[in-house]
């Protein structure tokens, strides 16, 4: 076991644990943000650098600080290590620079992007970004292309996190797309315009942290904060069958994989469950999905409304009907006759 201290909070973790994993064990605001790391994808992480932290003490044996910020998703904890995430102004300034770099080519089209409300980059820019950019050159532009009958790729929004490539490589039965070219002309593409049609290809949509890969069957149908997510399952011979249904009224607009508190997909689902089963009768409904209160999807959410209704009912039942309460005199007194 190794003892590590992150922003003044100490925890003992098994040997081989990364700083990011240790921070997630502690939980709360000290967990560094991530864009490319996904715990279910091997070799993920180390591309976007948003999870950088400052190691002010390397270990008990070698207490010297590390000379520059390190990626917490790829740096292993050492016994006695001390890490700063939110408590270092220099580190926060460096992370703001990383966010500024990610936004160099990313278009400001959040109002028309289907990922709005679920975009990790949108949240990252709000919490760690700056109000302006120093970039004065023309942004790179690409045409939208269909890389499958259900998936549309908009490379303008891509930040090259490699999540979709690793998902296709590790989850599907055959990867036909990847990153071509290098530097500022690098892009996601299929091999000689091949179509991505394998049975688990829809999971690439779920892992994309921005609006680069979108569900063609859901595009422009509704904003996510107008929908009602419900957890459901079915007996599926291809996958776990555990999904999240997004309702608008009685209509199921889309089906996605479930996510944990870090926004990572917990169960890979097949394309049959995702695209072909959009009737309530196809599923066993488990109940409302829990939505993080920090998410815009939770605005006017049924969970909040349910809690508000319970609070109102509790207050109503605390006094006999018709009993007057002394609230003061004047026009604001509801007991005035």
Image (cartoon, rainbow, N blue to C red):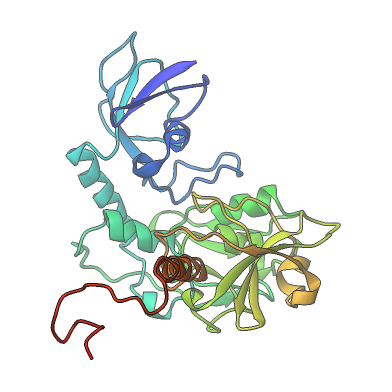
Q: Position of residue 217 (x, y in %)?
A: 64, 79
Residue found at the very far right of the displayed protein = 237
Residue 103, picture quadrant: bottom left
Residue 222 or residue 158, whichever sits in front: 222
Left or right of 329, for residue 222: right
Quadrant of the frame with the C terminus? bottom left
Give the camera-side residue of 44 and 289: 289
53 is higher (above) or lower (below) than 121: above
- Whether 124 is drawn above or below 21: the answer is below
In the image: residue 316, left or right of residue 94: right
Q: Position of residue 304 (x, y in %)?
A: 45, 67
Q: Residue furthest bottom?
A: 337
User: Which residue reaches farthest top?
Assistant: 61
Q: Nearer the viewer, residue 304 or 292?
A: 304
- Residue 271's quadrant in the figure? bottom right
Picture coordinates of residue 83 (x, y %)? 31, 28
Could you tell me if residue 156 is visible in this image? no
Q: How many marks?
A: 0
Residue shown at the point (34%, 15%) measured from the top left: 59
Q: Which residue is depicted at the point 32% across and 36% down?
A: 53
State the image quarter where residue 85 is shown. Answer: top left
Please tell me which residue is depicted at 25% across the width and 83% down the height of the picture: 334
Q: Is residue 15 above or below residue 253?
A: above
Residue 259 at least partly seen: yes
Q: Is residue 173 left or right of residue 302?
A: right
Residue at (38% x, 22% y) in the render? 4
């Amino acid at each position: 076991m190794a003892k590590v201290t992150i922003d003044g909070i100490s925890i003992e973790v098994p040997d081989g644990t990364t700083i990011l994993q240790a921070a997630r064990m502690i939980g709360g605001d000290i967990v560094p943000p991530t864009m490319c790391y996904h715990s279910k994808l091997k070799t993920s992480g180390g591309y976007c650098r948003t999870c950088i932290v400052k190691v002010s003490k390397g270990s008990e044996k070698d207490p010297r600080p590390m000379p520059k910020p390190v990626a917490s998703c790829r740096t292993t904890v050492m016994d006695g290590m001390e890490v700063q995430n939110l408590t270092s102004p220099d580190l926060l300034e460096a992370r703001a620079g990383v966010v500024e770099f990610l936004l160099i080519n990313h278009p400001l089209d959040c109002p028309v992007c289907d990922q709005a409300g679920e975009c990790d980059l949108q949240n990252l820019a709000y919490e760690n970004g700056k109000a302006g950019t120093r970039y004065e050159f023309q942004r790179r532009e690409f045409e939208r292309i269909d890389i499958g009958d259900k998936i549309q790729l908009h490379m303008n929004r891509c930040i090259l996190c490699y999540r979709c490539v690793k998902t296709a490589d590790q989850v599907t039965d055959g990867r036909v797309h990847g990153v071509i070219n290098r530097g500022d002309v690098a892009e996601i593409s299929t091999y000689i315009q091949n179509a991505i049609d394998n049975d688990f290809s829809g999971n690439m949509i779920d892992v994309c942290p921005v609006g680069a890969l979108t569900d063609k069957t859901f595009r422009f149908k509704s904003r996510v904060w107008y929908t009602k997510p419900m957890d459901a399952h079915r007996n599926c011979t291809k996958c776990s069958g555990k999904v999240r249904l997004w309702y608008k009224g009685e209509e199921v607009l889309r089906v996605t994989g479930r996510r944990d508190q870090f926004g990572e997909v917990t169960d890979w689902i097949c394309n049959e469950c995702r695209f072909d089963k959009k009737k309530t009768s196809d599923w066993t409904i488990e109940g409302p999905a829990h939505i993080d209160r920090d998410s815009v999807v939770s605005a006017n959410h049924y969970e909040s409304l349910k809690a508000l209704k319970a609070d109102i009912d509790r207050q109503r039942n605390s006094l006999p009907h018709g009993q007057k309460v002394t609230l003061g005199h004047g026009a604001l007194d509801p007991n005035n006759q």
